[in-house]
Amino acid sequence: MGFDIKMTDALYDYVAASNPEEEEVLKALRAETAALGSVAQMQISHNQALFMQMMAKISGAQSYVEVGTFTGYSSLIMACAMGPEGHVTTLDKSDDWTQIAQKYWQKAGVADQITLKMGDGLASLTTLLEEGGPDQFDLAFIDADKGRMQHYFDTAIKLVRPGGMIWVDNVLWSGRVADPDDPKQRTIQIRDFNHSLQHDDRVEHVMLGIGDGITIARVL
């Protein structure tokens, strides 16, 4: 059967129930994040986390950088996926959110595997490049200010080794990218980024309808 199935709510629940259950420390982190209100939607779904972990394990990744720590869910699942020899570098500018993240890293026993760098995400990426040179990381995850997707990507591509991957989150933007009449600047910027990858000979890529849409780009 060569077609993409429509993901109804019932089918999504079936998929979620068929996947491995969320670990207790992750459940607790999700619950505390949910209590923050509307910003909780910035946290990745459990299904997306499982996908990212599987990709990391298959690729044998040992070094990972992300732009956008929030409350630390993605950095926590990646530290666990890569094991004690792996290392996470995560970038954010919010003291309040990252304090929650650090608490759960400690609870999960992976705090020693995670380096948190505070400040502007793009400036922090640039500093990593200046201090450590290119090809430092196996994986990168971009999940921050959507208006600067292209800038984050252009810097991350220098930091990730050839054959490594860059994941970009929210590329479907709740479906708004498919609405040609949506005039909002963020929608246009994300749509422009998505289009630019079709002509970017530095990578090969695929967009998947997981979560709010995730693009996987393999650095050539």
Image (spheres, rainbow, N blue to C red):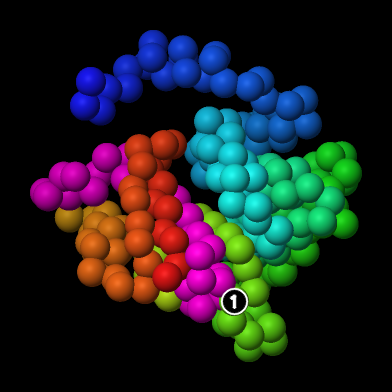
Residues in magenta, as a range: 155-182
Amino acid on which the number 1 mark rests in the picture: Asp
112 lies left or right of 193: right
Q: Nearer the viewer, residue 168 or 58?
A: 58
Residue 89 visible, this orientation: yes
User: In the picture shown, does residue 170 fall above or below 16?
Assistant: below
Question: Is label 1 in a helix, a strand or a loop?
Answer: loop
Residue 188 in the magenta stretch? The answer is: no
How far across and down, in percent of the image, does residue 104 sit? 80, 42
Residue at the (68%, 48%) spot, across then down: 78
Q: Is residue 127 visible?
A: no
Q: Residue at x 39, y 11 (%)?
A: 10
Percent across and percent down for residue 92 are 64, 63
Q: Which residue is mark 1?
A: 135
**Disc 1: CA contacts within 10 A as few (<14), some (14-19) or many (>=20):** some
Residue 174 drawn in magenta: yes
What residue appears at the point 64 percent right and 74 percent down from the top-left corner?
A: 136
Tell me the quarter of the image containing the C terminus.
bottom left
Residue 48 sits above or below residue 171 on the image? above
* Residue 117 x, y percent position in the rendering: 72, 69
